[in-house]
Amino acid sequence: MCALCGVLLEEHWAEDGGRRGRVFRVQLANRVLGHFGLRLDDWGGRTYVLRDGKGRSVVVANLGALWLEAERLAGRPLDPLDPELVAFLAA
Amino acid sequence: MPPDGKLPVALVTGFLGSGKTTLIGGLLAHPDMGETAVIVNELGEIGIDHHLLRRVDERTVLLKSGCLCCTLRGDLADELRDLLGRRDRGEIPAFRRVVVETTGLADPAPVVYTLLAEPVVKHHYVLESVITTVDAQHGLVRDESLRQVAAADTLVVTKTDLAPGSGVTAQLARLNPAARVLEASFGAVVPRDVLAPPAHPREPSQGDDVPTHAHGDVGAVTVVLDEAVDWVVFGIWLTMLLQARGSEIYRVKGLLDVGAGGPVLLNGVQHVVHPPVHLDAWPDDDHRSRLVFIGEGLDREALTRSLAAFSTAAR
């Protein structure tokens, strides 16, 4: 299992910040994911649901698992250093 | 012992013949070291290292076979749990610390992961420090050496008596600015110099971003940020970065200004990120975020631009 997924970790290192942090996290993740045609929704304050434009969806536990699944749904690597993404976010 | 009562674990790694066993022997012989249980791992059937460590034979747990990082990770967890059980049953004396010696070929990340993630182990133990030995004569000999050097909190250059002025010490300081670099011959070290993790990365200096040419494009870059970063933004950015480029990023360590009183101490080895520690105060007057990345083909400007773009998108 990839350590990044954090499935065995009780709490993923990047998942603190309470409810405000969670709402903000989903908003920002959607700014990024939107560039790749994906969307994230909070599911009961405990997990997330990631969807693509073809109606496919997958439940993800935390931010580590999110990017792994997002790569699978998008069918390509999601690189935060990609100049196109950087320009899209900075605009 | 740490305030939460967990037993500190020191991980000693380093290439074959780089002096791990000598270093551990030197540490154990020092009066400040206290009662220490040692877990060694070896390739092959003859426990040479085990015999070299016979002074602590009773508390040495010899892993049975294979490579610690891939196949014996479970065994490491088993041995750490077993040590607790044997101690509680009075079969072995109480110990204040555990030293784990990896094989020369081991990638330290899975060992770090075992200590951070295995439920029983992480409840009773805390990873105190990663120590990597490098032979001054031979330097960095293989790719495994680079990952071991990147993972280190303390780098110990050994056999300096055989190769004085070899330049290895300076090379290591460039390659891992997040680590303390010591020189030692014949395992002559003081435990507190080796075991206590350095407080924070050294100040970036001219030349830190220059990759070490002997190792292709592997090098360290230091990202310094003038403005505070939102922790949620940083979490999204770093998790995405490690998913995309985790195999190329050997280490990330630094202090992050998240707009609170003190910084957040961040420490990750490849994909494995320690639980971030919120510090009460900055260690010095420089309150800017400082993040050291060690890995392949790293571009400081690209990292800085990308994180800035994520911050902009969050506004």
Image (cartoon, grey):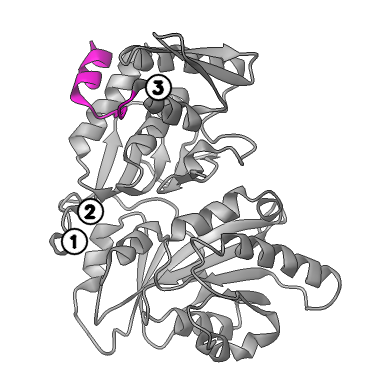
Q: Are marks 1 and 3 on the same chain?
A: no
Residue B219's disc is 2
Residue A8 within the magenta-colored segment of the rendering: no
Chain bearing mark 3? A
Residue A87 within the magenta-colored segment of the rendering: yes
* Front: mark 1 or 2: 1
Give the number of marks. 3
Chain bearing mark 1? B
The image position of residue A45, as x and y in percent, is: 63, 16
Give the extent of the magenta segment.
A75-91
Residue in the image at 25% along x and 30% along y = A81
Using the numbered discs, state the Cα–Cα distance from disc 1 to disc 2 in whole angstroms: 8 Å
Label 1 environment density (alpha carbons within 10 Å; few <14, some 14–19, many ≥20): some
Disc 1 element: helix
Using the numbered discs, state the Cα–Cα distance from disc 1 to disc 3 in whole angstroms: 36 Å
Residue B229 seen in the figure? no
* Front: mark 3 or 2: 3
Q: In which quarter of the image is the C terminus of chain A?
A: top left
Does the residue at mark 1 contact the one at mark 2 (Cβ under 8 Å)?
Answer: yes
The image position of residue B215, as x and y in percent, is: 18, 61
Residue in the image at 26% along x and 58% along y = B175
Q: Which of A72 and A87 is in front in this view?
A: A72
Residue B264's disc is none
> For mark 3, what is the residue?
A73
Q: Are marks 3 and 2 on the same chain?
A: no
Disc 3 element: helix
